[in-house]
């Protein structure tokens, strides 16, 4: 397998990208191609011992910045690390593309350069959602790609998320839940009521509506919602977790007795922190495009880069893109029967 890595994408590029790539290369036999400004990437690589037949560089002089207009940047910056990497997947020079760059540009670039899976209306960002106390994270689909959705979009998200959870995460017959303002079947607006009715007879392991308060409890394996709702859930959870840890830290360093208690609990506190650390879970796949594309957090550390590479490999090995393509017929059939 040839893994294409955007060497210039994200806040910590290229230093953390290169460091993470070297760390991942020590655990896999696959080849890693880092795309970006060759001189800068080579300078970072020179800091480490690595197999130069396993990690190579493809030069790309332009960089798509976070503040760039996504569509304009993708169209204008043809020699950017992102566009060049996506085209390598399209042409068959690579099997997987990973980037910590602009989410909007990566979505636009994936559509322009790789294209949608035929029959999938809109690609979605699928983000791993940690469940505290359980080694069974959920998958949130959509996490921000589509602020407004139609019925077929929600059904597509459910099918794509279910396939990804089963084939990549290894969750047999994953449960699928629809985010709503109540658990009863008649809750929500017309879109969500219609989605409930279709998912109920979809053949997926649909468990019904799920309230937001139950999402962190692991109410289902695949959390389905529009991108606006999904992004709010994700950002609210991140902010809440950060504030809780900050409060606990302040309380546990407030006085001698508190510090002694904190010292005794340090191992457990570190375990909890690790469970909520996004860098442990890898990146978010963009489901629905005709090639494996994974989005990393913009501030990804070397550890996040390494874990994204390692955890994205089954995306290719299990041929998830083809399986989503095959599921289109089921989606069309179930939607036609609902008309």
Image (tube, rainbow, N blue to C red):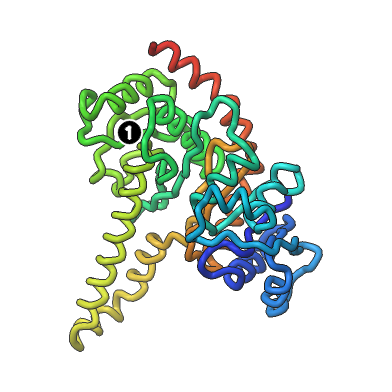
- Is 225 placed left or right of 3 in the picture? left
In front: 114, or 16?
114
Could you tell me which residue is drawn at 52 percent across and 34 percent down?
163
- Is 60 placed left or right of 98 in the picture? right
Choose top left, top right, bottom left or bottom right for residue 101.
Answer: bottom right
In the rendered image, the residue lying farthest to the right is 53
- Is 106 placed left or right of 228 in the picture? right
Could you tell me which residue is drawn at 72 percent across and 55 percent down?
30
The image shows residue 57, relative to residue 75, as above or below, that is: below
Choose top left, top right, bottom left or bottom right for residue 334.
Answer: top left
In front: 66, or 69?
69
Residue 211: percent from the left, percent from the top?
Answer: 24, 39
Residue 303: percent from the left, percent from the top?
Answer: 54, 66
In the rendered image, the residue lying farthest to the bottom is 256
Could you tell me which residue is drawn at 38 percent across and 25 percent down?
151
What residue is pinned by disc 1? 178
Residue 156: percent from the left, percent from the top?
Answer: 46, 29
| Secondary element at tag 1 | strand
Residue 66: percent from the left, percent from the top?
Answer: 49, 60
Image quadrant in which the C terminus is located: top left
Choose top left, top right, bottom left or bottom right for residue 265.
Answer: bottom left
The image shows residue 99, relative to residue 259, as above or below, that is: above
């Amino acid at each position: 397998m040839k893994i294409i890595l955007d060497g210039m994408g994200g806040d910590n590029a290229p230093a953390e990208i290169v460091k993470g790539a070297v760390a991942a290369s020590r655990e896999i036999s696959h080849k890693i191609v880092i795309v970006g400004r060759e001189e800068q990437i080579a300078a970072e690589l020179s800091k480490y011992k690595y197999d130069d037949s396993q990690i190579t560089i493809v030069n790309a002089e332009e960089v798509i910045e976070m503040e760039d207009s996504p569509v304009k940047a993708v169209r204008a910056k043809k020699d950017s690390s992102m566009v060049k990497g996506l085209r390598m997947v399209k042409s068959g020079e690579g099997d997987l593309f990973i980037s910590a760059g602009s989410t909007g540009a990566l979505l636009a670039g994936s559509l322009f350069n790789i294209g949608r899976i035929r029959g999938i209306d809109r690609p979605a960002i699928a983000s791993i959602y940690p469940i505290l106390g359980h080694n069974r994270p959920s998958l949130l689909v959509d996490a921000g790609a589509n602020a407004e959705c139609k019925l077929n979009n929600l059904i597509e998200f459910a099918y794509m998320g279910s396939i990804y959870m089963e084939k990549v995460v290894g969750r047999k017959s994953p449960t699928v839940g629809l985010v709503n303002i109540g658990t009863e079947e008649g809750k929500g607006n017309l879109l969500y009521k219609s989605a409930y009715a279709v998912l109920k007879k979809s053949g997926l392991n649909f468990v019904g509506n799920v309230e937001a308060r139950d999402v962190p409890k692991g109410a289902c394996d695949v959390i389905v919602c529009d991108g606006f709702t999904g992004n709010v859930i994700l950002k609210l959870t991140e902010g809440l977790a950060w504030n809780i840890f900050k409060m606990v830290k302040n309380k546990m360093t407030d006085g001698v007795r508190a510090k002694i208690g904190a010292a005794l609990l340090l191992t457990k506190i570190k375990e909890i922190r690790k469970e909520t650390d996004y860098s442990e879970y890898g990146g978010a796949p963009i489901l629905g495009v005709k090639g494996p594309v994974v989005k990393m957090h913009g501030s990804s550390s070397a550890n996040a880069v390494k874990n994204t590479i390692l955890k994205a490999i089954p995306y290719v090995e299990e041929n998830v893109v083809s399986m989503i393509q095959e599921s289109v017929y089921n989606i069309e059939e179930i939607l036609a029967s609902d008309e």
